[in-house]
Structures are given as C-alpha cells and as structure tokens.
Amino acid sequence: MIDVAVGSDIGRRYAANFDVTYLREQPLLALVADGMGDGPGSASAGRTAVDIFVEHVADAVELGPDTL
C-alpha cells in the first residue's frame, strides 16, 4: 500500500501561488505543474497543462496499455 498526498508552498517571491497539483489513487497519477511566475496567464497556465495531461492519460487508459 502506498499513502499519497500533495502540497505546495507559496514561497517568498510572489504574492500568490500558481502551482497546480493533481492526485489520483487508481490508477496512481500524481502531477505538479510549477507556477509560471505572477504574470498575465499564470493562474491558467498550470491548470491548463494539468487538465490536458490528465485528459490524454485518461483517454489512453481507456484505450489500453499499448497507447501509453
């Protein structure tokens, strides 16, 4: 058995944290999209990357292991 958890720290450089984490236990998938600074689009950059990655992995899992 594996215990899993995710977390992120705002740090000292920026006023907000734009890191995005994703955790799924079955099948295990853990992602971290490091924040992209605090410029325009920072809030959506990591979220978009994680969402697209998860969507494509989910599609591949449904199609079978030969697609991964």
Image (cartoon, rainbow, N blue to C red):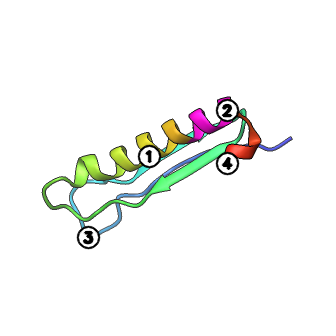
Span highlighted in magenta in the image? 57-62
Q: Viewer-nearest of labels 1 and 4?
A: 4
Instruction: Find disc 4 in the rendering and name its residue.
Output: 68
User: How far across and how far down the image is residue 65, in percent?
Assistant: 75, 42
Instruction: Find disc 1 in the rendering and name its residue.
Output: 50
Instruction: Find disc 2 in the rendering and name its residue.
Output: 63
* Precedes in sequence: disc 1 or disc 4: 1
- The structure residue drawn at horizontal position 15% and vertical position 61%, both measured from the top left corner, is 39
Residue 53 on the magenta segment? no
Q: Kindly report the distance in space between the C-alpha atoms of the residues bearing marks 2 and 4.
A: 9 Å
Q: Kindly report the distance in space between the C-alpha atoms of the residues bearing marks 2 and 1.
A: 20 Å
Horizontally, is 51 left or right of 5 in the view?
left
Mark 2 element type: helix
Asked if the residues shown at circle 4 and circle 3 are in contact, with their CB atoms under 8 angstroms apart, the answer is no
Q: Kindly report the distance in space between the C-alpha atoms of the residues bearing marks 4 and 3.
A: 37 Å
What's the amino acid at mark 1? Val
Rate crowding at label 4 as few (under 14), some (14 to 19) or many (20 or more) other CA atoms within 10 Å: few
Mark 1 element type: helix
What's the amino acid at mark 3? Arg
What's the amino acid at mark 4? Leu
Residue found at the very far right of the displayed protein: 1
